[in-house]
Amino acid sequence: MSLAPVSVRPGESLPGGRPAPRRRRYDREQVLTAAVFLAPALVVLGVFVFYPIVSAGHISLTSWNGFDPSKPFVGLGNYVALTQDPEFWNSLLVTVLYAVGVCVLSVVSGLAVALLLDAPIRGLGIYRTIYFLPVVTSSVAAAIVWRYLLDPSGLVNAVLAQAGTVGPDWLQDRWLALGALTLLTVWKNIGFNAVLYLTALQALPASIYESASLDGANGWQQLRHLTVPLLSPMTFFVVVQALITSFQAFDLVYVFTEGGPRGGTEVLGMFMYRTAFRLGEFGYGTAIAFVTLFLVLGVTLVQWRLGGAEGNDR
């Protein structure tokens, strides 16, 4: 039998004669004190966050070329043009495929490395440092090194030649280039994801694993039925981080493939850059940026709701 929630106004009594909680009222001095402490942060946010967003939103409604001070107003024309632009749809498809690959591999690789780093082995600090090195490595430097490695005369094809296999031209095939870009992104962030998972692993209570061992559960069963479900909040965070990284990708793509071959790796960030800074269509490029923002917000909200629903079911 379920009990309906009792609605009580402030000042009335709860069932049983208990007084209802009163709403806390802040006096003028407290409000002014809070305003004084919040004012510097609000000013910084207003100048460097909110104003640029509002200004960019206005630019997305114009056909500004970066020089004309009049900024001709076109309304939603840029957004309507995007729906009819095959290059935009190609860029969106590439970004979605790239994001899916990065999200899946980030979860798998991050958890696998965290499990290895959580094992009682000698020299654990050295291994943790090695795995975290890609995170602190410059994105430009990492992309240049990977580009040389995947060159037709690079180390990867040289190793394949020693094994009796002719290596492909990795960065001239759109699918191979997209796969290589995905692996580069996952490798670049594997240390960060591993640290997140390692922190969550070390916070899990040891008693549940002791109970599972007494019940006869082996290591794989404990990983599948205990570790993975208990780490679901951290997995949600890793997926959201990987998703945002994928939709904001630019520097790795610019140095590694420049969006090629034939638009095969032209993610939304690269498409926005080419439209705004190479073609001079700043209004159209800003509209692409806002569409990217709305897509990230939409997908994140959906994941948040699904994660919340799964949490309530458990």
Image: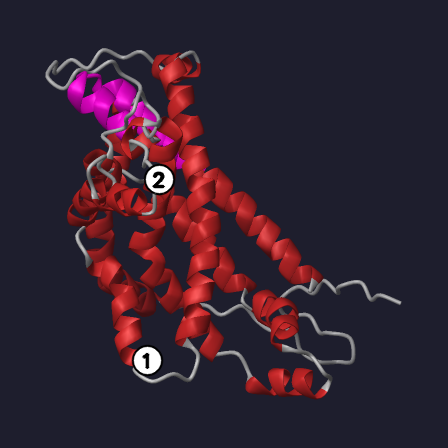
SS at mark 2 in the image: loop
The answer to whether residue 147 is left or right of residue 100 is left
Kindly report the distance in space between the C-alpha atoms of the residues bearing marks 2 and 1.
36 Å
Quadrant, the C terminus: bottom right
For label 1, the crowd category at 10 Å Cα-Cα, with few meaning under 14, some 14 to 19 and many 20 or more, is some
Left or right: 302, with 73 as reference point? right
Say whether disc 2 or disc 1 marks the residue closer to the N-terminus: 1
* Residue 131 on the magenta segment: no
Q: What kind of residue is marked 1? A: Leu
- Please tell me which residue is depicted at 72% across the width and 83% down the height of the picture: 216
Q: 144 or 148: which is nearer to us?
A: 148
Residue 256 image-quadrant placement: top left
Amino acid under disc 2: Thr
Residue for badge 1? 124
Which one is closest to the eye, mark 2 or mark 1?
Answer: 2
Q: Which residues are magenta?
A: 270-295
Q: Quadrant of residue 158?
A: top left
Q: Secondary structure at mark 1?
A: helix
Q: Position of residue 147 (x, y in %)?
A: 21, 40
Q: Is residue 249 visible?
A: yes
Q: Which mark is residue 165?
A: 2
Q: Taking 203 as reference, is 49 above or below it? A: above
